[in-house]
Image (spheres, coloured by chain):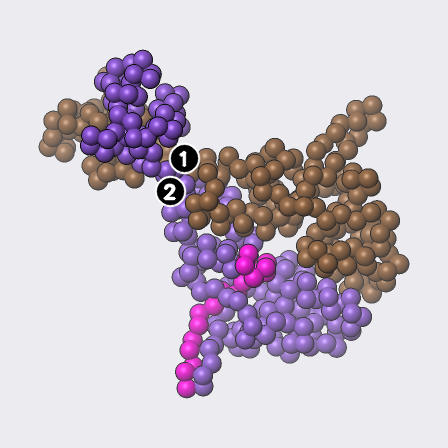
Chain colours: A purple, B brown
Amino acid sequence: MLSERQETILNIVKEQSPITGQHIAAKLHVTRAALRSDLAILTMLGLIDARPKLGYFFTGNKEKDLLSRVITDIKVESCLSQPVVVGEHTSAYDAVIAMFTEDVGTVFVANDNILVGVVSRKDLLRTALGNNDLRSLPVRMVMTPASKLIYVEPEEQALVAAQRLMEYEVDCLPVVNVLNREQEDRKELHIVGRISKTNITRLFVECGLGRRS
Amino acid sequence: MLSERQETILNIVKEQSPITGQHIAAKLHVTRAALRSDLAILTMLGLIDARPKLGYFFTGNKEKDLLSRVITDIKVESCLSQPVVVGEHTSAYDAVIAMFTEDVGTVFVANDNILVGVVSRKDLLRTALGNNDLRSLPVRMVMTPASKLIYVEPEEQALVAAQRLMEYEVDCLPVVNVLNREQEDRKELHIVGRISKTNITRLFVECGLGRRS
């Protein structure tokens, strides 16, 4: 993106700031005037900054700042997937069937669209290994209950969702609207969707291909 | 990133290219000279292009290209994880144990570090559901064999790895060095690591926080 000369100037400023335009010109064996447009561009790009009487400073990598701005602007609601939901009286076996039918790694357990729990491939594999009869085992016995769940709200940043996925070492988060039932001292989590490492991987690809702005 | 006037000029060029510098100046009620540095910057940024006797053209969004460069510069080798490997004579049960012990979703099956196959949580859950005795079942019967595997090489882009994860709908790819055994008409895949949607999610977080350059 930068020309060879712009890269050279940038490296000079990185190593020797503050440095005057005249000194940069001397190093490159050109006139000060010949550098004017290159210095203007590097300044406008925010890569270097000029201070009166001192000269040019390196200000850091604006490319990175720009990328992080593009990423932090992405909201969960713009990249979530449809949830796969089973009722709370479903068997563990039927939860696995839903998982395979819909080809997801995580299934939500809900009562009238209010989140009751979450069950993952890992939960079900552990249960199956324990020689349990999945057909007679209610999914409630296997799931992580809503009270212990990590979730995300639709208007939060996708970056925050990605951080939670990493921090809590889960593959998928429920996206919910939270309704505070203060009189009853509890929260109701209304399921809106799901966001998984797959969604984040798709976002990474879109950002890498310049399809998010 | 751009000044207000640069944005205005860019919009004029977008809507009316080709347009001469004089016409742009007239629209903004300034002199041609007053626009020189703005036009130079927009040209150097690759946002507009000048053609003799015709004027300025809009050439697309270079800002986006800059952003995607941060991502396309990331190589697989800079973000891979250690592989979890079992021998080819391991039982499916022991593969699950390795999966839980190492807390990964995918285990590689290898012979002397040469990839023989890959087995995922999904493969093992499907097998467990089929009422198989995992202890007496060799992992080879459950795995995807190397001949059908999608992989990535360490010097490829992380973006390419992310695209393959999405396209082939897998959670994890083996990172391998490929050795062509031409005389035997086969490829040997030497395991170097693994790259999963978890690694890509971590990269997304790092880019979002400006920690990748």
3D distance between C-alphas at marks 2 and 1? 9 Å
Q: Is residue A90 left or right of residue B73?
A: right
Q: Which residues are magenta?
A: A165-183
Residue B49 placement (x, y as % from top left): 31, 24
Which residue is outermost to the top?
A29
Most foreground residue, B122 or A113: B122
Q: Residue at x 54, y 63 (%)?
A: A173
Q: Residue at x 65, y 48 (%)?
A: B172
Image-based side of B197 in relation to A92, left or right: left
> In x, y percent, where is residue B46?
34, 28
Q: Is residue A96 above or below residue A136?
A: above
> Could you say which is closer to the camera, residue B106 or residue A49?
A49
Dot label at residue A66: 2
Badge 2 crowding class, 10 Å Cα cut-off, few under 14, some 14 to 19, many 20 or more, is: many
Disc count in the image? 2
List x then y, in percent, for residue A154. Answer: 43, 62
Residue drawn at (33%, 17%), measured in percent from left and top? A27
Residue at the spot of label 1: B66
Residue type at numbered disc 1: Leu
- Which amino acid, by three-letter code, is at mark 2? Leu
Residue A190 seen in this snapshot: yes
Left or right: residue A29 compared with residue A93: left
Q: Quadrant of residue B35?
A: top left
Residue at image point 70% right, 66% down: A124
Task: Point out the image quarter for the N terminus of chain A.
Answer: top left
Image vertical order of residue A37 relative to residue A84, above or below: above
Marks 2 and 1 close (CB-CB < 8 Å): yes
Up-down: is A96 above or below B185?
Answer: below
Give the side of residue B199 with respect to residue A7, left or right. right
Chain at numbered mark 1:
B
Disc 2 element? helix
